[in-house]
Image (spheres, helix red, strand yellow):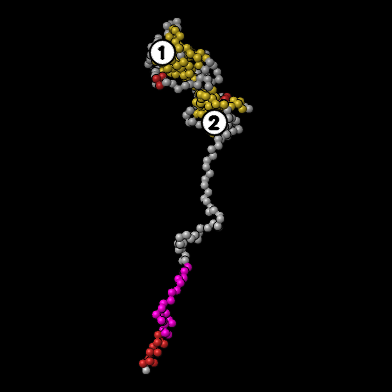
């Protein structure tokens, strides 16, 4: 009876061992199974990303385009002959209100870069001979703009230079004669310079003055030579009516190219 009970127990144990894997006291080792990667998961190190193309064996990976380096080749040379040093000049025209085109090249067909006005001071930097005449490459002294203007719209004669500070801020006498306004500058030694301004064309021009003795009444005389645009030179003569002591309230007379006027020293 006891033998039969043991055999029955052993049979039951083996039957249960088929499901529990514990029969005979040994456990079976199973190889691990890789699970599929979930969407959005980060790939393992060394594996390519789903959005990154992998070059085929033997092909180099594509590189990002680089901006081209700036060209070091020199541009086309500007036409014309350099003027060195630069020469001061000013714009002129038959009509005082004229606008004088500033062009990109020495030709009336070249594009415009703006315009200047009669009397504008410029510096002449280059010259070029074209079919319709001589052209100048100019730089405007006030704005710094540069371009080409034909020579018949430019004058270098009588171009006023900036006055020294002691002259510009010193005593002066002013007057009018026809279409010309004039300013006469003086110091303790007498009259030194006269500047004319054409009220129609806005051109200005200067004449230095030197003492030339006295007139028949003992009044000091001064003389100079002025060259307006496209004319002259013409003689300038001034008489100091103060008797050699110009100052507040004194007067002078001036003669220039057949015109006469009176100046007042304020």
State yes or no: residue 19 in magenta: yes
Report the quarter where the C terminus lies: top left
Residue at the extreme top = 216
First-in-chain label (2 vs 1) = 2
Label 2 to label 1, Cα distance in Å? 42 Å
Instruction: From the viewer's side, name the closer residue of 12 and 71.
Output: 12
The magenta span reads 14-36
- Quadrant in the rendering for residue 71: top right
State yes or no: residue 98 in magenta: no
Q: Residue at x 48, y 21 (%)?
A: 160
Residue 157 image position (x, y, % from top left): 53, 20
Residue 190's tag is 1
| Pointer 2 residue | 147
Residue 12 image position (x, y, % from top left): 40, 87
Residue 220 image position (x, y, % from top left): 43, 9
Q: Residue at x 42, y 84 (%)?
A: 14
Residue 84 image position (x, y, % from top left): 52, 24
Residue 126's tag is none
- Residue density around tag 1, few if under 14, some if 14–19, many if 20 or more, within 10 Å: some
């Amino acid at each position: 009876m006891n033998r039969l009970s043991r055999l029955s127990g052993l049979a039951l144990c083996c039957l249960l061992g088929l499901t529990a894997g514990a029969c005979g006291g040994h456990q079976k080792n199973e190889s691990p199974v890789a699970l599929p990667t979930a969407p959005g998961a980060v790939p393992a190190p060394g594996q390519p990303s789903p959005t990154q193309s992998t070059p085929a064996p033997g092909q180099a990976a594509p590189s990002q385009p680089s901006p081209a380096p700036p060209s070091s080749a020199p541009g086309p040379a500007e036409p014309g002959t350099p003027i060195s040093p630069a020469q001061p000049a000013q714009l002129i025209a038959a009509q005082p209100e004229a606008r004088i085109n500033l062009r990109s090249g020495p030709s009336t067909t070249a594009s415009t870069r703006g315009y200047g006005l009669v009397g504008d001071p410029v510096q002449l930097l280059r010259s070029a001979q074209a079919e319709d005449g001589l052209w100048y490459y100019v730089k405007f002294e006030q704005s710094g703009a540069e371009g080409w203007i034909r020579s018949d719209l430019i004058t270098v004669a009588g171009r006023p230079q900036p006055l020294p500070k002691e002259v510009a801020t010193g005593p002066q006498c002013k007057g009018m004669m026809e279409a010309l306004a004039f300013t006469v500058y003086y110091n303790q030694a007498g009259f030194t310079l006269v500047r004319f301004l054409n009220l129609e064309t806005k051109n200005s021009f200067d004449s230095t003055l030197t003492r030339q003795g006295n007139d028949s009444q003992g009044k000091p005389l001064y003389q100079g030579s002025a060259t307006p645009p496209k004319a002259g030179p013409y003689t300038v003569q001034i008489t100091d009516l103060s008797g050699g002591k110009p100052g507040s309230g004194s007067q002078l007379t001036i003669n220039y190219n057949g015109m006469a006027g009176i100046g007042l020293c304020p």
